[in-house]
Image (cartoon, rainbow, N blue to C red):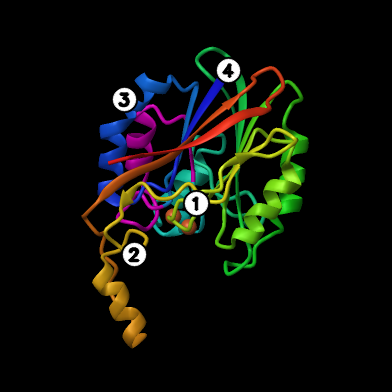
Amino acid sequence: MFKILFIGDIYGQPGRRIVKEHLPALTEEYAPDLVLANGENAAAGFGITPPLVEELLGLGIAVLTSGNHIWDKKEILPYLAEHADGRLLRPANYPGDSPGHGIYLGKTRAQVPYAVMNLQGRVFMPAIDCPFRTTDLLLERIPPEVKIRILDFHAEATSEKMALGWYLDGRVTAVVGTHTHVPTADERVLPGGTAYITDLGMSGPYDSVIGVEKRSVIEKFLTQIPVRFDVAKGDVRLSAVLIEADAGDGRARSIQRLMRR
Ligand SMILES: [Fe+2]
Ligand SMILES: [Fe+2]
């Protein structure tokens, strides 16, 4: 059985620390063939820098996905442009000349080929290209021998995420949602063999509003005046899923939520 560990949005220094602390034990316990993570909030909640990409990949994460926050740290733009086949993805459905790319084709240490895709939703989010049609185009580019196909759908609306899950059922191994930073309890394997969860949840401080120090967020809602968002500190958790799939046909057999503190 092929095992994939997918870690939800790594939020700031607390998120990086909890992943560093728990990944060795998780790796020992579950022996994943592939470790993936969303890194869009690794740099103090907003974006990711080249040194942080290297730091997270150095922990044994094979590919980093991202989302709307990928553009926050300006130094990541030339990095994305220069690492055209790199292991940091941005959503594939940003307009054509945006730096970076949204699909990675690789092989595990045991030489099992896999594909990781990153798409972003459009409901309550920037009006980028259609994630459904863009995924169709990406799937055409994946060689038929690549059976393990994992997609991070970075989106706000549960309806859009579920719809993409059903749209891709039987065509990919897994559709996992990210972006809301709140883990959902709806993990399941769809009838066609696609593992699905609406949101992985955040790896970061849960004594917060989606990672941000909660007083400043409440202040913002009360006054509507822009405030500085600092990374919260308390109740740090790692949130992830473990997916088991048949490497022969790429169908998922199980998906389970994991949380560590
Ligand atoms: Fe995020
Ligand atoms: Fe996001």
Q: Give the range drawn in magenta.
A: 41-65
In this view, the residue farthest toward the left is 233
Q: Which amino acid does label 3 sit on?
A: Pro
Q: Which of marks 3 and 1 is nearer the N terminus?
A: 3
Residue 1 numbered mark, or none: 4
Q: Mark 3 points at which residue?
A: 24
Q: Nearer the viewer, mark 4 or mark 3?
A: 4
Q: Is residue 148 magenta?
A: no
Measured from the top left, where is residue 145 in percent x and y? 73, 20
| CA gap, disc 1 and disc 4 | 25 Å
Q: Earlier in the sequence, mark 4 or mark 2?
A: 4
Measured from the top left, where is residue 136 in percent x and y? 77, 44
Q: Mark 1 points at which residue?
A: 184
For the residues bearing labels 2 and 3, Cβ distance under 8 angstroms: no
Q: What residue type is labelled 4?
A: Met
Q: Name the residue under label 2.
A: 209
